[in-house]
Image: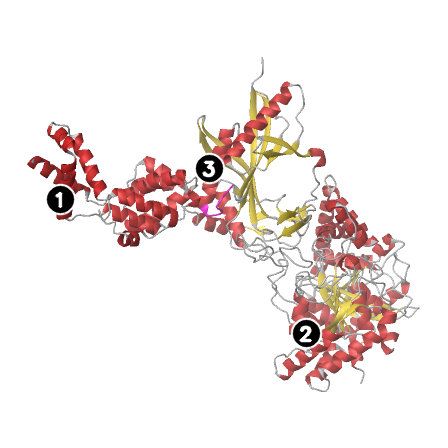
Amino acid sequence: MSKIYETVIGLEVHVELATKTKIFCSCSTAFGGAPNTHTCPVCTGMPGALPVLNRQVVEYAMAVGIATNCKITQYCKFDRKNYFYPDNPQNYQISQLYLPICRDGGIEIETAAGKKTVGIHEIHMEEDAGKLVHDEWEDVSIVDYNRSGVPLIEIVSEPDMRSAEEVIAYLEKLRLIIQYLGASDCKLNEGSMRADVNLSVREAGAKEFGTRTEMKNLNSFKAIARAVEGERARQIELLEEGKKIIQETRRWDDNKETSHTMRSKEDAKDYRYFPEPDLVPVVINDEWIAEVRSRQPEMRQEKMARYQTQYGLPAYDAGILTGDKTFADLFEAAVEICGKPKKVSNWIMVETIRLLKENGMSPDQIQFSPENLAKIVRLSDEGTVTNTVAKEVFELVFLKDIDPEAYIKEHGLSTVSDEGALRAAVEQVIRENPQSVEDYHNGKEKAIGFLVGQTMRAMKGKANPAMVNQLLRELLQAI
Amino acid sequence: MNLMSMTAIELGSKIKKREVSVTEAVTAALDAAERKEPQLNSFVTIDREGALKHAQDVQKRLDEGQIDSPLAGVPVAVKDNLCTEGLLTTCSSKILYNFIPTYTAQAVLQLQQAGAVVIGKTNMDEFAMGSTTETSAFGETKNPWNLSHVPGGSSGGSCAAVAAGECTYALGSDTGGSIRQPSSFCGVTGFKPTYGTVSRYGLIAYGSSLDAIGPVAKDISDCAAILEAIASYDIKDSTSVRREDYKFTSALIDDVKGMKIGIPRDYLGEGLDDDVKNAVLKAAKRLKEKGAVVEEFDLSLVEYAIPAYYVVACAEASSNLARFDGVKYGYRTKEYEGLHNMYKRSRSEGFGAEVKRRIMLGSFVLSSGYYDAYYLKALRTKALIKQAFDRAFEKYDVILGPTAPATAPKLGESLSDPIKMYLGDIYTISVNLAGLPAATLPCGKDRAGLPIGLQLIGDCFQEKKIIRAAYAFEQTRNYEYSPFAEV
């Protein structure tokens, strides 16, 4: 009979901070740019160049630490991690080992199994490396230092998670917190959020942890979930066969849904960490912490409550809108302009989410402005356009961020409320649909719906529906 | 009128009075350097073309009244570990044999803003690792007092060039005595300021927590003026210190009445050459005669300075020198297979023996399992040494002693016994570990006619006390030119 195993998971999450400039120099962190154009002597490791710490990096790291209930290390230092690789121009990375900026925190997650807290061991600040491009054709490697020196924080969890579901819940919560703080956009597919999974299994009830492996190259939540399941299965199989788990770093191949060894513990490098002598310790006094704390933005729970009290939204709406920072920002900005919270909420929850799904997009890829959303809400609410027209125009807003007002004017899509025109259309529909007219007179109320539809169709969706309804009843009665 | 026998302030004053043009001053230095270099080898690079062009610019700025520095137009030589835009900067290493920086070190930039004209880059021990300038990949520099002796190191090129009159003054760097010891051996005046006083931006690092840039000149007045020009709070160097007072020249006063001067007994014991000891004590007596209160005391911990220094400096160096890998600039081996082979061969071929020794030592003391036993212990020792100095400076304004235990050794004597060479830094090293300012100035010659250096050490940020004591002492002696200055 096979044994019952428990999976033990801890995560190391790297997050690229949203600063305008790099961590140790004033070069831009902007994405793109021709190779080696966002560089200077500091981030290309030129002899004699010295790092100067970007204060914003410290503040973002503190903000994330405060939001994840960490203790802020008030005397924190940078250390050098020494290793040779061409993407790392100094052949050492400035990171934090001995005195990381945040320690001993945790966040609450909720899964089908209930609520639990996942501990955060530490958060430290460090610099990103450059990018190596291997040109197979020319058989050369080229290095681009534009990313070299982009600020990162690494959030190291305690080994508190027990399932893929918990891992995803933790990552989603962490991402939402960081997005709310504006500290990063946390895009896994673009690498601004990266997670390495440390996983071991043990027999249920065992006190000691099993031997763990570290899994790298996980580019989506789905890949992470698959990798957790895959690695759990692999380790259990080894144990069942009486084999040992080797402590090693593995690389996940999401196409094949398998992993392979990158390096074993024996190959582990000795990074020869020591305090970075070119930087002075970062001394964080109580006032600074209080200042950062006072600037913390409204987080999800507070926002959810406020949406219900201030805007009178149902809890369901508030939950969905605050579940993604892009939705919440869009909602608040559009309400600010048009002042119709429930209507705006509906447009986001129904039409926007539908279009995102249809186009295979995530909320952070939304391109339209809150101004144009507010216009749609207003135009449809005031009856300037019918619901049908509004939805059609909104698709264009969604795809191309067009100005709906101008578009409606230009294409003559405003609702027709001219009684003469509507009466003529209704009369024609009645003439062309004698069967429905008869059904109506035989007491089939539903038939009127069909006739309204036909009229709307004849008017290309622009007819004022209330007037059409009224005219239809009036004319049908007269028959 | 021999322009090269003047101090920087004297020459600067003549230039200001239009008695000498900048081009004349610079040409005099270039001519002297080119004439003497075949024998001396103080320079890695002499930049005649660039210097003459700068000379014209400076003259123009002077004529237009744009600069008012006492150093305007005076030719300077810069140690080859300070980056100079567009001008070869090698650290006297094969691995940087072709390296042309894209920017200029802050200290050099400030000198240039004051109108100084850089005539070239001076030879040094490779990456400032050595005490003789013999570890240079471009040949050793000779001592202008006796060509069969070393000039000291690592700023041996700067000190020899000043002593030989190849330039009016020079910049050096001091990690464990690299300005003071060669200044002492070459009979010139050198100054290592408090750590953080001169920006390290653009100084190719050896031991980052110990490195300091400072002047090498004929006397303390020049040193004070140069220090005034190169010192600054620089946001590009996080270890730079914002100081209240940069007016070092205001301490050039011949008055030491009541000044308390301590001589560490630890500096006068075993290993100290008699001639050096006598010259230093004679200098102390001169200051006493001028009204200073001079007494001996026990500093303690002196014997721990050398091991602590070599652990800290080499640890930092092992990391600082990692960037020289053949990937981005400098030397790359001709044939290699794959990345790691390229790294290994480029570094094996590009670095000299002493540099490799220190990289290995530094890598070892930082490696897992040894970090606590070596590196952390060295840091604790460093802190204790600072405390010993703190206690001394509660009683004394200035600490006086020899700069080096003996005068310049013969060429080739030192490298065969590195431990002996390391021990030669015993009086200078603790100053770097404690981050203190210290000066060396000539105070006599030994039986072989080689110069002896007097070291004056001050508490952090107390450069002015050193300058005052040095200036008072200088009034009791004449500056002696090296025999080679006449060549």
User: Residue B7's quadrant in the figure?
Assistant: bottom right
**Residue A445 visible in this rendered orientation of the protein:** yes
The label number, if any, that marks residue A173 in the structure image: 3
The label number, if any, that marks residue B3 in the structure image: none
Q: Type of residue at label 1?
A: Arg
Q: Nearer the viewer, residue B290 or B487?
A: B487
What kind of element bears circle 2?
A: helix
Which label lies toward us, 2 or 1? Answer: 1
Crowding at dot 1, Cα within 10 Å, few <14 / some 14-19 / many 20+, comes out as some
On whether residue B323 falls in the magenta region, the answer is no
The image quadrant where one finds the N terminus of chain B is: bottom right
Mark-to-mark CA distance, 2 and 1: 101 Å
Q: Is residue B446 above or below residue A10?
A: below
Specify the subunit that label 2 lies on: B
Does A343 sit left or right of A267 as displayed?
Answer: left
The image quadrant where one finds the C terminus of chain B is: bottom right
What kind of element bears circle 1?
A: helix
Q: Type of residue at label 3?
A: Lys
Q: Which residue is mark 1?
A: A423
Q: Which residue is mark 2?
A: B249
Name the residue at the top extreme. Answer: A1
Specify the subunit that label 1 lies on: A
Q: First in sequence: mark 1 or mark 3?
A: 3
**Secondary structure mostly seen in the magenta stretch:** loop
